Image (cartoon, helix red, strand yellow):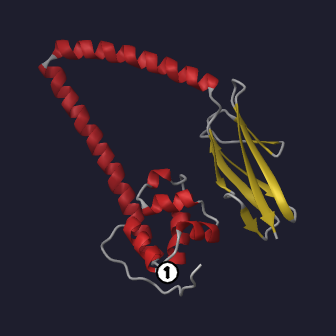
Amino acid sequence: MTPFKSNKISLNNENISEQLRAARKAKNLKLADIAKKLNISRKYLEALEKDEYDKLPPGVYGKNFLREYAVFLGLDYGELAKIFTAENQIKQHGGRQELFSKQVVKGRNFMAAPKIIKSAVIIAAASVCFIYLGYRLEKIVSPPDLSIYNPMENLITEKNSLQVVGKTEKEAQIIINGELVLSNTAGDFNKTINLKNGINIITITASNKYGRDNTIVKQVLVK
């Protein structure tokens, strides 16, 4: 990988994704190399460069990834963090305005054509019932969702312990290396485990009440 100096790069009016992309290309770096260097999944770096924040982990993890990436590229994280917060607020407000506009239009149409709306409501109610039945059936036959935010893929560390952080569906049971781990009402869970020198295999399994399992295996190398 091409060596570089971590000089600060001045910010302009570009959004975060454009600034990150421009800084990386200016240093002639590849996402795969950076992901390996920072121990951050490449898909999260791509999400930052494509302005797809909904693909980032919830909570503080997304901002932490932005901080590490910005510092690595020599960008001013303080300014980027402000833009990151502002862009998220604009997207959220925009979504609320769009929803509100749709509700206003529906109200006017109901007043203008009550008979048509009445029929549409009946059809919509029937559709919702079928969709709900399909959703319940899928829940029965499908394994629970399981996402692991930490550790990253093929993590290399010098520490003798790490925190396993993830999220699953509500009421799903979590087993990490054969040990039951409790999750909160939203399905978030974390567990600190001890590591040994060499390769450590971490097996995380989520099981729902219908007997369906979803298992993720992580490898952590301790030097």
Q: Hey, what amino acid is under mark 1?
A: Gly
Which residue is at the front of the view, 119 or 184? Answer: 119
Question: For the residue labelled by badge 1, is the local secondary structure a helix, a strand or a loop?
Answer: loop
For residue 179, what is the image quadrant? top right
Q: Position of residue 94 (x, y in %)?
A: 30, 49
Which residue is at the front of the view, 171 or 8? Answer: 8
* Quarter that holds the N terminus: bottom right
Q: Position of residue 95 (x, y in %)?
A: 32, 45
Q: Residues within 10 Å of mark 1 (few under 14, many from 20)?
A: some
For residue 172, what is the image quadrant? top right
Q: Is residue 208 left or right of residue 90?
A: right
The structure residue drawn at horizontal position 53% and vertical position 67%, both measured from the top left corner, is: 31
Q: Is residue 68 left or right of residue 214?
A: left
* Quarter that holds the C terminus: bottom right
Q: Which residue is mark 1?
A: 74
Relative height, residue 106 to residue 149 (above, below): above
Total labels: the figure holds 1
Q: Is residue 89 left or right of residue 201?
A: left
The structure residue drawn at horizontal position 46% and vertical position 50%, both measured from the top left corner, is: 54
Is residue 23 shown to the viewer in this render? yes
The structure residue drawn at horizontal position 78% and vertical position 46%, both measured from the top left corner, is: 203
Is residue 62 shown to the viewer in this render? no
Relative height, residue 90 to residue 186 (above, below): below
Q: Position of residue 162 (x, y in %)?
A: 76, 60
Q: Position of residue 198 (x, y in %)?
A: 85, 64
The structure residue drawn at horizontal position 62% and vertical position 28%, both measured from the top left corner, is: 142
Relative height, residue 136 to residue 105 (above, below): above
